[in-house]
Amino acid sequence: MPGEIAVTTEEKFQDLIDEDWARRIARDVLKAEGLVSPYEMSIFFTDSETVHELNRDYRGVDAPTDVIAFYMTYQTESGKEEFFPSPPDGIVHLGEIIISYPQAVTQATEQSHSVEQELALLIIHGVLHLLGYDHEKAEDESKMRPRERTLLKQIYLEG
């Protein structure tokens, strides 16, 4: 069974996002990170208000953000992250990425690059979160940010 990546776009952004392109970016990241099928995950493109609410309700951060990843891990009492046990179907259930399309537009303008490049970066960022990368601590950020740049170059800029 191949990897399943569901991509959904809020109706008002449907003409602005190529869902097959987004799926390819995510699949290329998973491949570059060595994840083989079967797996499943989803990406949802929505508005800034929805992502802000999710950030507030699930992360306790009452501020806008560009991307949120809900991954299938939990923190043990000792502080170690563990993956939830997978059902016996043999599929790796990675989680869900939610991206604010308007925030991507804003950030693309601020960074003087295309909205497509910003969306590629946000997809890469979200997939890396699903795979356990983080950037809350400096030592984690020093691993995640260079990996994002490398993948963006390999998958989007050169791909």
Image (cartoon, rainbow, N blue to C red):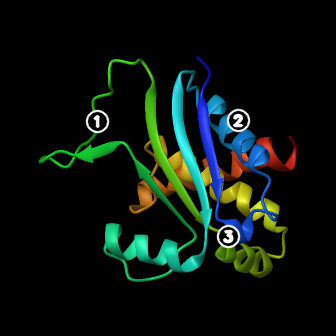
Q: Residue furthest left?
A: 77
Task: Identify which residue is drawn at 26% across, 46% down.
Answer: 74
- Alpha carbon of mark 2 to alpha carbon of mark 1: how far? 24 Å
Q: Quadrant of the N terminus?
A: top right
Q: Residue furthest right?
A: 158
> Which marked residue is nearer to the observer: mark 2 or mark 3?
3
Q: Position of residue 4 (x, y in %)?
A: 59, 32
- Is residue 110 something one can see in this rendering? yes
Residue type at the position of mark 3: Tyr
Q: Earlier in the sequence, mark 2 or mark 1?
A: 2
Q: Position of residue 72 (x, y in %)?
A: 36, 42
* Rendered view: 137 above or below 107: above
Q: Earlier in the sequence, mark 2 or mark 3?
A: 2
Is 28 placed left or right of 63 in the picture? right
Q: Position of residue 5 (x, y in %)?
A: 61, 38
Name the residue that disc number 3 marks.
Answer: 101
Q: Circle 1: is it few (<14), some (14-19), or many (20+) Cα within 10 Å? A: few
Task: Identify which residue is drawn at 52% across, 28% down.
Answer: 39
Name the residue that disc number 2 marks.
Answer: 28
Viewer-side residue, 121 vs 140: 121
What kind of element bears circle 1?
loop
Q: Position of residue 117 (x, y in %)?
A: 79, 60
- Residue 84 got which mark? 1
Residue type at the position of mark 1: Phe
Tell me whether circle 1 and circle 3 mark residues in contact (CB < 8 Å). Answer: no
